[in-house]
Image (cartoon, grey):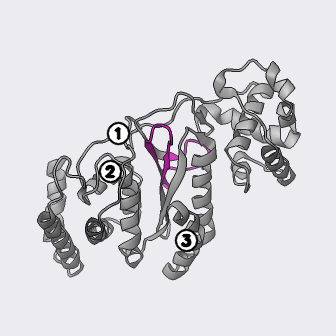
């Protein structure tokens, strides 16, 4: 995947019409099944981690081409369309549903016969923790969807900036994330870029990650505890941080655990953005390590949707597409692959 461009995902009011969401579920299943039958479960997960494919998928399902709702509705439709029947589990969701991801992963893994639920739960928790605490770009997570097969997983999660009312989507893939803390994203999508974003996953912050662990274990963060000391520091605005009692308590608790590396550090429960920022600034102050203040958002797209722009959803064509794809999937199961070959030729022609 190329890492170029930006995405334009403003907040739109209202909800997805029930009739449209019902059709989205009906169409999402045969599309997923066609990809799984033609390629594999892993290929479908890989495509969900591709921001261009995900956006195009949302447009095919008929939702807004440029609103934040495309993420939540597409993920919601995929969760409710029965993907476990083709070997794919979907956990989490929007708001409070996102917090249910770990227990849903365990339940679905047991139902699907997967034996790696512990590592899947860890991937779910760490991906959310990284985008909430290690990538401090002004966007608060409110959507976390975790897709997984026997051997692979994909995360699609989204944050909202309360000031500019834009959303930011974060894509993860187990095939790309060799580490949870070293440039792990398949993509980060948003058009509105932050002027000052602390990115502890950037290559530029590599030494700072090691120094953060050292600063915690050595207790150097105490150098930032007193306001009198902070006032003497000549730092640009984006370096400012004030250590509250809660942050100091979290740091002290983390120190008792004595993490061996940065991944273990951020996995500590209760250690949030303020503590991560405090350690990063301490590493910068004490050890002189470099930090990345560059916003990591990269991708952009533009297509069609539910509010009649550029045109209303054509229900008849939508139903015909659902029928054709379901028929192609069922016939492929019986050995007749003419329709799926035609779809592949169409795809090649479009490309």
Residue under label 1, please give it.
300
In contact (CB < 8 Å): disc 3 and disc 1 = no
Residue at 17% across, 73% down: 323
Q: Where is residue 321 in the image (x, y as percent from the top left)?
A: 16, 66
Residue under label 2, please give it.
55
**Mark positioned earlier in the residue sequence (3 or 2):** 2
* Residue 224 in view in this figure: yes
Specify the segment rendered in magenta: 156-185
Image check: 314 left or right of 266?
A: left
Quadrant assignment for the N terminus: top left
For marks 1 and 2, give the CA distance. Answer: 9 Å
Secondary structure, mark 3, is helix
Mark 3 nearby-residue class (10 Å; few <14, some 14–19, many ≥20): many
Q: Where is residue 131 in the image (x, y as percent from the top left)?
A: 57, 47
**Mark positioned earlier in the residue sequence (1 or 2):** 2
**Was residue 226 drawn as part of the magenta stretch in this picture?**
no
Q: Nearer the viewer, residue 268 or 166?
A: 166
Secondary structure, mark 2, is helix
For marks 3 and 2, give the CA distance. Answer: 25 Å
Residue at 17% across, 55% down: 312
Residue under label 3, please give it.
105
């Amino acid at each position: 995947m190329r890492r170029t461009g930006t995405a334009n995902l403003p907040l739109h009011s209202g909800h997805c019409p029930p009739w449209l969401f019902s059709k989205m579920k009906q169409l999402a299943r045969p599309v997923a099944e066609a990809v799984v039958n033609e390629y594999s479960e892993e290929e479908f997960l890989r495509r969900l981690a591709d921001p261009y494919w995900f956006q195009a998928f949302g447009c095919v399902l008929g939702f807004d081409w440029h609103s934040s709702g495309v993420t939540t509705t597409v993920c919601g439709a995929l969760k409710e369309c029965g993907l476990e029947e083709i070997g794919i589990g979907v956990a989490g969701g929007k708001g409070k549903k996102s917090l249910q991801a770990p227990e849903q992963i365990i339940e679905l893994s047991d139902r699907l016969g997967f034996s790696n639920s512990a590592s899947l739960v860890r991937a779910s928790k760490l991906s959310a923790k990284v985008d909430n605490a290690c990538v401090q770009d002004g966007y608060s997570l409110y959507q976390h969807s975790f897709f997984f097969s026997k051997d692979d997983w994909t995360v699609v999660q989204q944050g909202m900036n309360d000031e500019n009312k834009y959303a930011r989507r974060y894509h993860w893939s187990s095939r790309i994330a060799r580490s949870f803390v070293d440039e792990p994203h398949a993509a980060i999508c948003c058009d509105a870029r932050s002027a000052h974003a602390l990115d502890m996953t950037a290559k530029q912050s590599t030494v700072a990650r090691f120094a953060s662990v050292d600063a915690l274990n050595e207790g150097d963060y105490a150098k930032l505890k007193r306001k009198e000391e902070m006032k003497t520091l000549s730092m640009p605005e984006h370096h400012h941080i004030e250590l509250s009692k809660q942050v100091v308590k979290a740091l002290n608790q983390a120190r008792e655990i004595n993490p061996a590396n940065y991944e273990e550090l951020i996995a500590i429960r209760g250690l949030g953005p303020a503590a991560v920022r405090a350690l990063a600034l301490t590493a910068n102050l004490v050890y002189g390590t470099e930090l990345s203040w560059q916003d990591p958002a990269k991708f952009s797209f533009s297509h069609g949707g539910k509010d009649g722009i550029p045109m209303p959803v054509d229900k008849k064509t939508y139903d015909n597409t659902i029928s054709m794809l379901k028929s192609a999937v069922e016939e492929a199961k019986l050995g007749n692959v003419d329709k799926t070959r035609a779809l592949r030729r169409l795809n090649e022609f479009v490309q």
